Amino acid sequence: MSVSDLANDLKERVANGSFDSVVKFDCGDDGVLVIDNQSVTTEDKEADCTIGVALEDLESIVAGELDPTAAFMAGKLKVDGDMAVAMKLSSVL
């Protein structure tokens, strides 16, 4: 799955959610995915919080197969910026 495919999968969840911040998932060479309030894009932009994560791990988190907290504790996620914004992601993921 590509970052674009994942963005398309998340659009409905985010549009129906109550997320009110900007968070960027930086998947390295695979690209970026940005949740900006109630929209999703693959265009790189400034964010309140940037999360470094491998695309495969992000796919697993979105699919509900990998707990984000466990991924963070295992070093699979690197959070830069406002940690409170990262914690609010549970409302859309």
Image (cartoon, grey):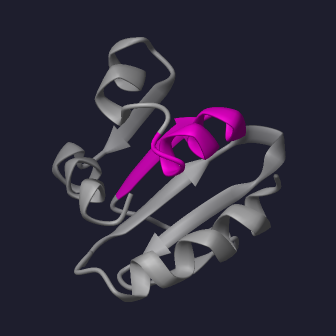
* Magenta stretch in the rendered image: 49-64
Quarter where residue 9 is shown: bottom right
Asked if residue 52 lies in the magenta stretch, the reply is: yes
Left or right: where does residue 16 sit relative to residue 7? left
Left or right: where does residue 90 sit relative to residue 41? left
User: Could you tell me residue 79's position as x and y percent?
Assistant: 38, 36
Q: Residue furthest top?
A: 74
- Asked if residue 77 is positioned above or below residue 37 in the image, the reply reads above
Closest to the observer, 22 or 3: 3
Quadrant position of the C terminus in the picture? bottom left
Asked if residue 48 lies in the magenta stretch, the reply is: no
Q: Residue at x 63, y 45 (%)?
A: 59
User: Could you tell me residue 55's position as x and y percent?
Assistant: 70, 40
User: Could you tell me residue 87's position as x and y percent?
Assistant: 21, 48
Quarter where residue 22 is shown: bottom left
Q: Residue at x 29, y 49 (%)?
A: 86
Left or right: where does residue 52 sit relative to residue 56? left
Closest to the observer, 5 or 81: 5
Left or right: where does residue 31 sit relative to residue 89? right
Q: Residue at x 29, y 72 (%)?
A: 21
Closest to the observer, 63 or 85: 63
